[in-house]
Amino acid sequence: MKLRVLLFLCAVTFNSFSQNNVLVFQSDFGTKDGAVSAMKGVAMGVSTDIKIFDLTHEIPAYNIWEAAYRLSQTAQYYPAGTVFVSVCDPGVGTSRHSVVLLTKSGHYFVTPDNGTLTLIAEQLGIQEIREIDEVKNRRSNSNESYTFHGRDVYAFTAARLASKTISFEEVGPKLPNEVVKIDYQKPVFEKGIIKGGIPILDIQYGNVWTNIDKKTFGNLDLKSGDWVNIQIFNGSKKVYTKKLQLVNTFGQVPVGTEVCYFNSLLNFAIAVNQGNFSEKNKIYSGATWSILISK
């Protein structure tokens, strides 16, 4: 009986981590040339059964932090077994590791280990990491190409993994369960003040998104309609201070009004109703940006 239970649990664990033929691409390449299409072509050359999706290819050039954030924003909505490729790789061809991370949620991430995995490792947990063996997992006749690992290594390896052409163990040697991390301000509550980071902008509208979640915000005991004291910093320089009203919807205030609200990820955010808060106030995002909020 105990043996049957053990075998059942092993089967459940295996199935939860099994690849599902879904492959999701992210890069800072843009779509003006053929780079993204080339990666997809390599993947389809491995297997035409793969279902390919785009997360985004509009990561600002070399912005590893934003690549890290977009993965954490999106990956949780894909089923276990999905393979993600993220290529924001200013150190291409150098000694940084090329890896595949398997999370505790059963998702796979194929990427350079350059900080891109900072938030995913925290959010979904590290089950195991393997370094890509480029002798076995590299596109044929590409050894003299040093600057397009997205095509020659990552897309090729990811497609082989997603299609179950190779197992996770066949990716390459196992590494310690650690990733290169980018330092950033995590949300903390102390002495009536919440301090958090501004990891990203809602770029289409210029809204400022923080990483202060509703649970942390709850320490202030504020509700919709109340006013919130806000200070925003870039490094040690204070660039904005104001008291804004907390709303549930933008329709609660006139057009052009600055407000605070909770975004679709249920994190504290700031906006101008039908305007662009970021451009208006010259406030941007990244690991150097932080925010203080209080009653």
Image: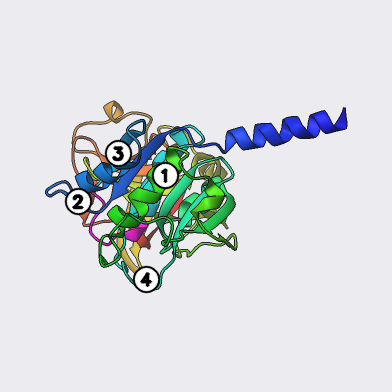
Residue beneath label 1, please?
A: 160
Residue beneath label 4, please?
A: 236
Residue beneath label 2, please?
A: 35
Rendered location of residue 214, percent (x, y)? 50, 39
Secondary structure type for disc 3? helix
Q: CA distance from mark 1 to mark 3?
A: 10 Å
Residue beneath label 3, please?
A: 44
Three-letter code, disc 2: Ala
Three-letter code, disc 4: Ser
The foreground one among 241 and 173 is: 173
Rendered location of residue 277, percent (x, y)? 23, 47
Residue at 57%, 57% (x, y): give it: 190
- Residue 60 highlighted magenta (yes or no): yes
Number of residues whose C-alpha sits closer than 10 Å to that of mark 2, classed few (under 14), some (14–19) or many (20 or more): some
Secondary structure type for disc 4? loop
Magenta region's main secondary structure? loop
- Report the disc number at residue 211: none
Q: CA distance from mark 3 to mark 2?
A: 14 Å
Residue at 24%, 45% (x, y): give it: 203
- Residue 149 highlighted magenta (yes or no): no
Q: Quadrant of residue 287?
A: bottom left
Q: CA distance from mark 4 to mark 3?
A: 48 Å
In the rendered view, does 256 fall on the left or right side of 20? left
Nearest to viewer (mark 2 / mark 1): 1
Q: Magenta part of the protein: which range? A: 58-65
Number of residues whose C-alpha sits closer than 10 Å to that of mark 4, classed few (under 14), some (14–19) or many (20 or more): few
Nearest to viewer (mark 4 / mark 1): 1
Q: CA distance from mark 4 to mark 1?
A: 46 Å
Nearest to viewer (mark 3 / mark 2): 3
Q: CA distance from mark 2 to mark 1?
A: 19 Å
Three-letter code, disc 3: Met
Q: Quadrant of residue 272?
A: top left
